[in-house]
Image: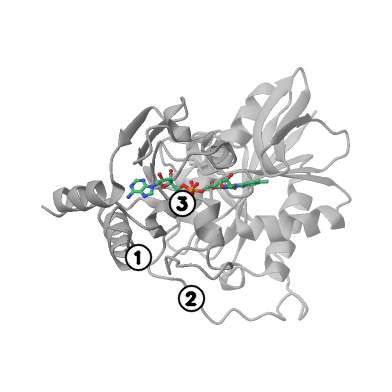
């Protein structure tokens, strides 16, 4: 009989992030399918009541909380101590949490302390009788494994975008506080602030409706025999700013900086989509100046609606890899689209 704990960090405004509400759906799915399957919620942060109230109707039997300013910051020592206390207090055999950077960093240590087992990047789950089976990716999402374990506690870090966001009525949760005394080791790291680029400077936007992929064609000689790098930069940044799309790249384009060729200054390897890059999840994708070769397109497997703009009617997108291929000059098309978005 499993006892299930859902873990989440509350945000400074007393809400739960989307990834946590997705992991809550996963925890509820497991709780609903396993016999026994009692669910507890364990929240960590400085302002927990609001977050607990927002999910009061989820059906959890208990709401445990490690609360205080020391637990609002992302720091291994305090995050691990808080999660360990919640797991011990709940007596959980299964612990589900969103695969955020905070949990990805701290839960492996908690797992070690409790002699459990941990799975990261979990992309699906299924219950056969009372046996929980998890799916997770290996080798940069090229292989998917289904696995189960007998060792407990079993920690499960759920990937974002896999489960639906939990939706339900807010209510009034009865919080049970769990006290955690942090020793000096836990507090050795002091968080003095957070530096993040403004959302406009951020080109990777996982929640965006559209993935805009730039290929190496943007930096190649065009019909007039010239390279138009500055125009390319302005067109792409203008489009991103207006459409709020997320920026992806082909490998050839991001590799150019190492090869001493002309580059788009805002592009880095983090933008690379494909076999050796990312496999983002967006409802729609638009590839521009990109040939659509298989090692690139394999990174598009979770993009539902695919379109591409290429001057080459025989490019990879033309052979069934895109729903729509516009055989056109991307410089002209994106300039026109930017004009329309502007007006
Ligand atoms: C082991 C391995 C792993 C790889 N992993 C990845 C990966 O993760 N991701 C990845 O992307 N690639 C990967 N590759 C490389 C991949 O095979 C291709 O080489 C790469 O995707 C090509 O990039 P591209 O389409 O931008 O450039 P190109 O092949 O140079 O294509 C540029 C395209 O732009 C078009 N074009 C030019 N000007 C315009 C214009 N004005 N308007 C419209 N179209 C225009 C051209 O017609 C051309 O089709 C991998 C390769 C290997 C061997």
Q: Residues within 10 Å of mark 1 (few under 14, many from 20)?
A: some
For marks 2 and 1 on the same chain, the one whose residue lies earlier in the sequence:
2
Asked where in the image residue 2 lies, by quadrant, the reply is top right
Secondary element at tag 1:
helix
Mark 3, other Cα within 10 Å: few <14 / some 14–19 / many ≥20: many
Residue at label 1? 229
Q: Earlier in the sequence, mark 2 or mark 3?
A: 2
Work out how far the residue at label 2 is from the one at label 1, CA to CA, in angstroms: 30 Å
User: In the image, what residue occupies the spot 69% across and 32% down?
Assistant: 38
Seen as rendered, the residue at the extreme front is 225
The residue tagged with tag 2: helix, strand or loop? loop
| Foreground: disc 2 or disc 1 | 1
Residue 48 appears in the rendering: no
The answer to whether one can see residue 105 in this image is yes
The residue sitting at 57% across, 48% down in the picture is: 278
Which residue is at the front of the view, 56 or 107? 107
Q: Which residue is mark 3?
A: 248
Identify the residue at image location x=72%, y=34%.
143
How far is disc 2 from disc 3 in space, using C-alphas?
23 Å
**Label 2 crowd (10 A; few <14 / some 14-19 / many >=20):** few
Q: Position of residue 221 (x, y in %)?
A: 37, 58
Left or right? Give the position of 113 relative to 46.
right
Which residue is under mark 2?
Answer: 195
């Amino acid at each position: 009989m499993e006892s299930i704990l859902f873990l989440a960090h509350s945000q400074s405004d007393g809400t739960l992030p989307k990834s946590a509400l997705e992991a809550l759906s996963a925890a509820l799915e497991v709780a609903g399918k396993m016999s026994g399957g009692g669910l507890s919620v364990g929240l960590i942060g400085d302002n927990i009541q609001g977050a607990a109230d927002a999910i009061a109707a989820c059906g959890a039997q208990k709401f445990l909380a490690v609360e205080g300013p020391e637990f609002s910051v992302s720091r291994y020592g305090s995050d691990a101590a808080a999660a360990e206390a919640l797991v011990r207090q709940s007596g959980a055999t299964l612990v589900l949490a969103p695969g955020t950077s905070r949990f990805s960093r701290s839960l492996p240590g908690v797992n070690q302390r409790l002699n459990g087992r941990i799975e990261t990047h979990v992309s699906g789950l299924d219950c056969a009788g009372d046996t929980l089976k998890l799916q997770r990716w290996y080798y940069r999402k090229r292989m998917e494994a289904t696995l189960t374990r007998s060792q407990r506690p079993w920690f499960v870090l759920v990937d974002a975008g896999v489960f639906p966001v939990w939706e339900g009525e807010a209510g009034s949760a009865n919080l049970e506080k769990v006290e955690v005394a942090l020793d000096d080791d836990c507090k050795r790291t002091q968080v003095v602030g957070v530096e993040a680029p403004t959302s406009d400077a951020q080109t990777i936007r996982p929640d965006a409706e559209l993935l805009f992929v730039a290929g190496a064609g943007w930096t190649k000689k065009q019909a007039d025999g010239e390279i138009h790098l500055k125009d390319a930069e302005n067109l792409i940044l203008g489009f991103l700013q207006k459409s709020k799309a997320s920026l992806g790249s082909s490998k050839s384009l991001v590799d150019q900086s190492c090869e001493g060729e002309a580059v788009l200054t805002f592009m880095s390897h983090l933008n690379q989509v494909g076999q050796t890059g990312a496999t983002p999840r967006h409802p729609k994708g638009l590839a521009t100046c990109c040939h659509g070769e298989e090692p690139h397109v394999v990174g598009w497997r979770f993009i539902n609606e695919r379109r591409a703009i290429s001057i080459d009617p025989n490019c990879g997108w033309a052979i069934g890899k895109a729903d729509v291929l516009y055989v056109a000059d991307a410089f002209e098309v994106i300039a026109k689209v930017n004009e329309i978005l502007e007006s």
